[in-house]
Amino acid sequence: MRLGEWIEANMEKILARWEHDATQILPSGGFSPAQRRDHAQAMMERIAVQMAEPQTTAERYEIAKGHSTRRPGKTGAQRHGLGRMRSGADVLHVTTEFRALRLSVIELWSEDTQPSDQTSFADLMRFDQAIDQALSESVESFAAEKDKQARLLLTTLSSMPDPSYVLDLDGCFIYANKAATELYRAPLEKLAGRRINDLGLPISDNLFRDIERVIQSRAQVRDELTMPDLSGKRRYYEYIHAPVIDDEGQVEALVGTARDITERREAEALIWHHANHDPLTQLPNRRLFRDRLDQHTLHAERTGAAFALFFIDLDRFKEVNDRLGHDKGDQLLQQAAQRICDCVRETDTVARLGGDEFTIILLDIDDQEQIKQIALQMLDKLAVPFPLGEDSGSISGSIGITCYPQDARTPSQLLNNADQAMYAAKNNGRNQFCFYSQVKDHGTTARARFISELREAVSKNQFQLLYQPIVNLANGGIAKAEVLLRWRHPTHGLLLPADFIPLAEEIGLIGDIESWVFTQATETSKQWQATIAPHLQISLNLSAREFCHQNSEIAWASELEKLGLSGSGFAIELTEKIFSEGTQSLAEKLSRLEKAGISVSLDDFGTGQFSMAYLKQFPIDYLKIAPMFVQSEEVNKTNRTIAETIIVMAHLLDIEVIAEGVETRQQKDWLRDAGCDYAQGFFFSPPLPDRSFEKILSKGYISASSG
């Protein structure tokens, strides 16, 4: 029997022997028994057919020289090489596999037929040539696929916008894609074999230390570096270095990739700047000022360094603002800020607390005479008329000065001291400065005591929240509740907001108070929404000045999200004064509230100089008719006309109306008949502590006997 015929007849026996040998040759991962047989069977069948075909002398010589005589299309050997490449084998596996196949056929055929004649030897030679040809085709296919994958990988890496590179264990470049060559400013042929620190670029030392960390730990390392681009602009990169591990578990190279995060860093810096700087003057705002004051106080406590704190209030600014308008007023504030900055060093801090109030931290200074000269220079500059287009504005300044450590050692006390000294300067005729030591020597004023007590009211738990129901006039149900603040003063008794809120705004304490109110109200609201009133809306009063000059609406939305509360459960009440604060970001602030689902009520509507155009320009949800248009023994005809006009106008703009100060059934009935949506007042209920309000809230409506 010829060898080709024997192969076809004994295919299973050959494959069984070969499969046993292949198990010892091929890597264990990625090969199933079927995969170990399919390519080999296809090759053997092709060889058997080939051996049965006539072969000329010329063809034998071509095959002996390694030239293929295969037909069009992929042969079994080619498919074998392709499959082995994709399964993770290497060229050594492939060649050893063919040797095992050759040995399996020759041994089994010799055992069965014991070939000895010339024909048998000729078959063996032809079989040997066929195996070599199959091996050649398999290796060729294997190599072609490997080259293809290398090209694909190289093309992918080269086209990536992120710099990618390979380094040897000495930190020398082996490979760099196009983005990497641009980053390191040299083509690959010049980078190859050079270390990163030999390129003469200002690169962070962390990069070199990280290379050593990867080699020693055999783990990924992630870090950041900065580099100037060709224009000199500093750019930020985030990079990852990962080890390449060989078969023995040792690091043989490092791969790295970097990503340009400059835009992200700049966006973060911009967000931080907006959160910590006054949008009008670009000076540090109250938050950043307080942080720096805290840090400087800690530093001075450790080192013994002295510093001075100025509190500046612009005299007669309101007069200029009212006379020339808010745009000119803003221009004056910007120019005043610049004049103040011109009097101090870059290392000092100038901040705008809000309105026409500024503060300065003068570092490393304890010479009172030098401090006086700075204050006098500042007063002189502020007294020069400010050019405001075709107009001009004249103001002056009142400056309060306190010193660390002579006057106080805590940030709060220092700020309180400077505030008292500033008011002493203002009360003494304005356009002058006053040291706290001068105020202290003359005793503490009643105003100073009241300010000090107000600053301590939160920590001493003297504030109290009351809740007044807002009733749906259509069905009598409690739809909302306005949160009202009271101060239980230790000597003056229960104080209404009008008794202390203006002062809190004046001394910059309003933000802390409103933050406390918001925290307390949200905790109570969360409890009520979870138990007895899931749809109750809580309404909070906010300072127009604080709202316009801070970004507290971002914090409110974030806090509600953390607490798992819907924004629809909250409304803020603002007076018409927000439209006279002259801020360009008002629409953006109101829009952010709208996106968070927080409603906006315009309080005391009808009492200010309000332009109806604002109702179209800004997202206002509710108008609250001022009590003066509702309250009287018998509803005044003029007031009735104004209130009814407000109701009609608001409804045409899809704005709901709340009437305040309802005290009689007659007022309630008239408002209901006029189409007013909601009402609140003593007719329904006075403001109540949370426990008392909870009792009427559990009923869900106000009974007739309540009014």
Image (spheres, rainbow, N blue to C red):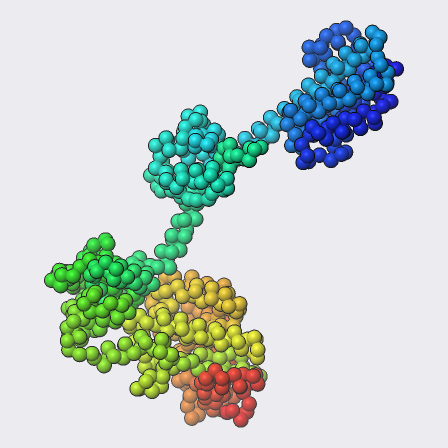
Q: Quadrant of residue 22?
A: top right
Task: Out of 576 and 488, give the one closest to the viewer.
Answer: 488
Percent x, y of residue 691? 49, 84
Task: Out of 611 and 8, give the one closest to the viewer.
Answer: 8
Against 87, is 636 above or below?
Answer: below
The quarter of the rendered structure image containing the N terminus is top right
Task: Out of 58 and 360, give the one closest to the viewer.
Answer: 58
Circle count:
0
Q: Quadrant of residue 438?
A: bottom left
Against 574, is 684 above or below?
Answer: below
Residue 591 visible? The answer is: no
Percent x, y of residue 251? 51, 34
Residue displayed at 32% across by 79% down: 500
Give left or right: position of 301 versus 120. left
Percent x, y of residue 373? 12, 61
Residue displayed at 73% across by 35% down: 32
Residue displayed at 74% across by 31% down: 36
Task: Out of 491 and 204, give the one closest to the viewer.
Answer: 204
User: Residue furthest toward the right?
Assistant: 1
Q: In which quarter of the image is residue 123?
A: top right
Against 541, is 178 above or below?
Answer: above
Give left or right: position of 54 versus 189. right
Residue displayed at 43% across by 63% down: 554
User: Residue furthest toward the left?
Assistant: 369
Residue 685 visible? The answer is: yes
Percent x, y of residue 153? 56, 32
